[in-house]
């Protein structure tokens, strides 16, 4: 399947697909004319990559996770679980920071509120 067909089937732009290929997340054979030729199974892989990006992972982490996700459970080494645990810890820390910032802004807003004038 050509890159345009993969883009249509996966709902991902051709630009993103080129980025994925550049970073080793997907691979394509080349036709004699030099066109990319993707296997049909690449659609599922692209959808999975999209989910991992949506979860906040970077392309390096995704590249590490993909072999784990694609291997049978009995062959997994625990790398995936460790990477996911690290990502969860990172996001929980980020959430704590955001909650603290919200509390500070709410307190400042309350302290600096302009008193209302009785009518």
Image (cartoon, rainbow, N blue to C red):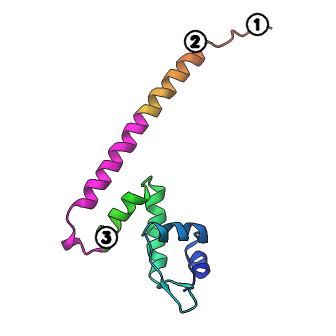
Q: Which residue is mark 3?
A: 67
Residue at 55% in and 74% down: 10
Please say if the residues under marks 3 and 2 sit with CB atoms less than 8 Å apart: no
Q: Nearer the viewer, mark 2 or mark 1?
A: 2
* Secondary structure state at the residue bearing disc 3: helix
Left or right: 80 as drawn, with respect to 74: right
For the magenta stretch, what is the residue range? Answer: 71-96
Q: Quadrant of the N terminus?
A: bottom right
In depth, the one of 98 and 16 nearer the eye is 16
Q: Which mark is residue 64?
A: none
Q: Residue at x 43, y 69 (%)?
A: 25
The residue depicted at 45 percent of the width and 66 percent of the height is 23
Local secondary structure at mark 1 = loop
From this view, report whether residue 37 is shown above or below residue 103. Answer: below
Q: Which sits earlier in the primary sequence, circle 1 or circle 3?
A: 3
Q: Mark 1 = which residue?
A: 118
Report the front residue among 19 and 1. Answer: 19
Q: CA distance from mark 2 to mark 1?
A: 19 Å
Q: Quadrant of residue 63?
A: bottom left
Q: Position of residue 111 (x, y in %)?
A: 58, 12
Q: Position of residue 32 (x, y in %)?
A: 54, 92
Depth-wise, is mark 3 or mark 2 nearer the camera?
3
């Amino acid at each position: 399947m050509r890159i345009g067909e993969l883009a249509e089937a996966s709902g991902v732009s051709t630009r993103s697909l080129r980025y994925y290929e550049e970073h080793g997340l997907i691979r394509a054979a080349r036709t004699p004319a030099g066109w990319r030729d993707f296997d049909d199974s690449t659609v599922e892989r692209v959808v999975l990559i999209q989910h991992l990006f949506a979860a906040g992972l970077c392309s390096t982490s995704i590249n590490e996770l993909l072999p784990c996700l694609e291997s049978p459970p009995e062959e997994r080494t625990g790398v995936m679980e460790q990477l996911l645990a690290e990502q969860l810890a990172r996001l929980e820390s980020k959430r704590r920071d955001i909650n603290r910032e919200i509390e500070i802004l709410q307190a400042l807003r309350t302290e600096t509120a302009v008193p209302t004038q009785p009518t």
